[in-house]
Every structure is written in structure tokens, then in C-alpha cells.
Image (cartoon, rainbow, N blue to C red):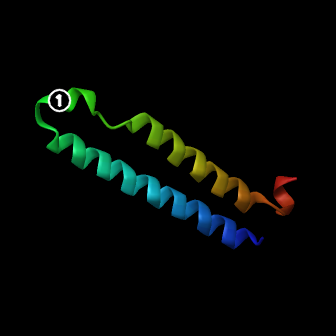
Amino acid sequence: MEKSKIVEIIKGRIKSDEVELQREIKLFEQSGTYAKYAVPDYSYYAGRKAAFKEAIELIGMLDKKNNK
């Protein structure tokens, strides 16, 4: 698989995580009195986003002369 395809897949995962977080936020705002039990997991999505961005950076470093 080519590096560009891998980066595209990872960016798609970042985007789908963002969509899911926004969905959770919307449900949380609409949940009313039980909102404290439906708090979106912000740290989970922030961690995934950071990990995916780091993966993209590392993929960009592959086969570079100055990174050996």
C-alpha cells in the first residue's frame, strides 16, 4: 500500500472520530436531566486524534535521508 493511501485512511479515521464526538455532544445537549450520565468522552477522542496525527507525521518521515 502506498504512503498516500495510508495517510488518506488515517485522515478518514480522524474525520469519523470528529463526527462521532459531535454526535455525542449533540446527544448530551439534548439529554436533559440525565445529562451528567451521558457526558462525551473528550479525552478519548483527543487521544485518538493526537495518535493519528503522530502516525501521519511518522509516515511522512519514512525514507527521508535526514531521519535515518
User: Which residue, given by chain and number where applicable, does mark 1 sit on?
Assistant: 34
Quadrant of the frame with the N terminus = bottom right
The relative height of residue 20 versus residue 46 in the rendered view (above or below) is: below
In front here: 65 or 50?
50
The relative height of residue 1 versus residue 42 in the rendered view (above or below) is: below
Give the x, y percent position of residue 15.
45, 60
**Which of the 4 image quadrants contains residue 34?**
top left
Is 22 on the left or on the right of 58, as rendered?
left
Residue at 60% across, 69% down: 8
**Which of the 4 image quadrants contains residue 56?**
bottom right
In front here: 17 or 68?
17
Give the x, y percent position of residue 5.
67, 72
In front here: 30 or 3?
30
Say what amino acid the circle numbered 1 marks: Tyr
The relative height of residue 2 versus residue 61 in the rendered view (above or below) is: below
Instruction: Label 1: state its secondary structure.
Output: helix
The relative height of residue 45 versus residue 61 in the rendered view (above or below) is: above
Give the x, y percent position of residue 16.
45, 58
Residue at 37% across, 57% down: 19
